[in-house]
Image (tube, rainbow, N blue to C red):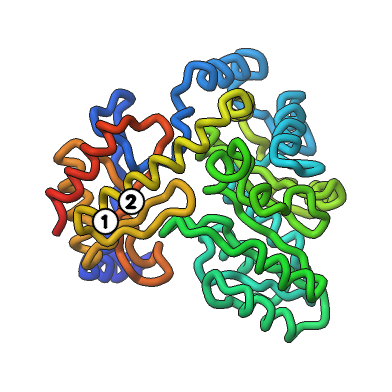
Amino acid sequence: MAFGWIDEQAAARRRAGLVRTLRPRPADSPLLDLASNDYLGLARHPEVVEGAAAAARTWGGGATGSRLVTGTTELHGELERELADFCGFEAALVFSSGYAANLAAVTALAPHGSLIVSDAGNHASLIDGCRLARGTTQVVAHADPDAVRKALGTHDGPAVAVSDTVFSVDGDAAPLAGVVEACREHGAGLVVDDAHGLGVLGAGGRGAPQAAGLAGADDVVVTVTLSKSLGSQGGAVLGPARVVEHLVNAARTFIFDTGLAPASAGAALAALRLLGREPERAARAREVATGLHARLTAAGLEAVRPDAAVVSVRAPSPEEAVQWAADCRAAGLFVGCFRPPSVPDGISRLRLTARADLSEEQIERAVRVIGETRP
């Protein structure tokens, strides 16, 4: 029977406790949200919402075509210029998602005959970019510059190292200074995904590369998402102008994809300008993360010390992680639940988002619920 193998896989997922379920949320959910990636609390900010609405009124509901045909509006260009300037890079190119931006950066910058050195903890979008690229991929130990250096030493041709700046599972930061040093010793480029760093790390939220002194470097390319700290949707690649020009001509997820919807571009631009005026939001997100970690560990829970805004709490098993998250929801708290195969180390955990707009009372409430519902 066609697709009969799907039933076998579904049964295996059920036995392993790995079935995933969609849970549509209402617009006015009563749950305290520690699951979304809205790090700065901007997704519903009046200025961001109006930015989306104004763009839709001006440009319509969609971009109407690929960026190279009709999908590039003046608004897209404005967003690209301001995003590059904010983060300290020469140029930027906006995509329909952060996933598409990562696929573009990795595949277009790793041609046949090149080597890609990929951190073992990288996000799925970077992993898929490595799989689709024509270069050869070597996966190295997590957050280990010496492993990057050793891998690069085995290859004589073009090479690029690929890494998250802040890893999405545990919220730990990559040792960017050590990784870029290893790359420069071998003349390799560096591509980093700053999805969880933009808006949280760096001066006023300008990102982890800026904090590490790599903004504007001619051998560094950065991808970002507009769907986390900026409360919108979409992604971008930042880097030297010649790299951006190359992506316009070579990146398949740019050439063959419909452009980012104007409403999303307008929302992201409004959020970026708001962050520029209120840089303290970045520091507040980090403060909330630190506070969550301190309270959770004081309550006897095994929480990973956050380097940005993600706080990870270990669970005994996939089944218990799912039940723990469900019990939290029943108690009015929405938390993330990460299980294999989403986590490379096979350890299930609750994943908490430290948002800049959380009050001290909400933080205390979240810790209390998590402690009371622990397996």
What residue sits 61% from the left and 54% below the top?
A: 193
Q: Residue furthest right?
A: 242
Residue 356 in the figure: left or right of residue 129: left
Q: Give the structural element (helix, strand or loop) at label 2.
A: helix
Q: Amino acid at mark 2?
A: His
> Which quadrant would residue 94 be assigned to in this image?
top right
Image disc number at residue 297 = 1
Where's residue 42, x and y in %? 48, 28
Where's residue 81, x and y in %? 77, 32
Residue 168 in the figure: left or right of residue 272: left
Where's residue 66, x and y in %? 72, 38
Q: Give the structural element (helix, strand or loop) at label 1.
A: helix
Q: Amino acid at mark 1?
A: Thr
What residue sits 50% from the left and 38% below the top?
A: 283
Q: Quadrant of the N terminus?
A: bottom left
Where's residue 11, x and y in %? 24, 68
- Return the residue at label 2: 293
Label 2, label 1: how far apart the Cα atoms are: 6 Å
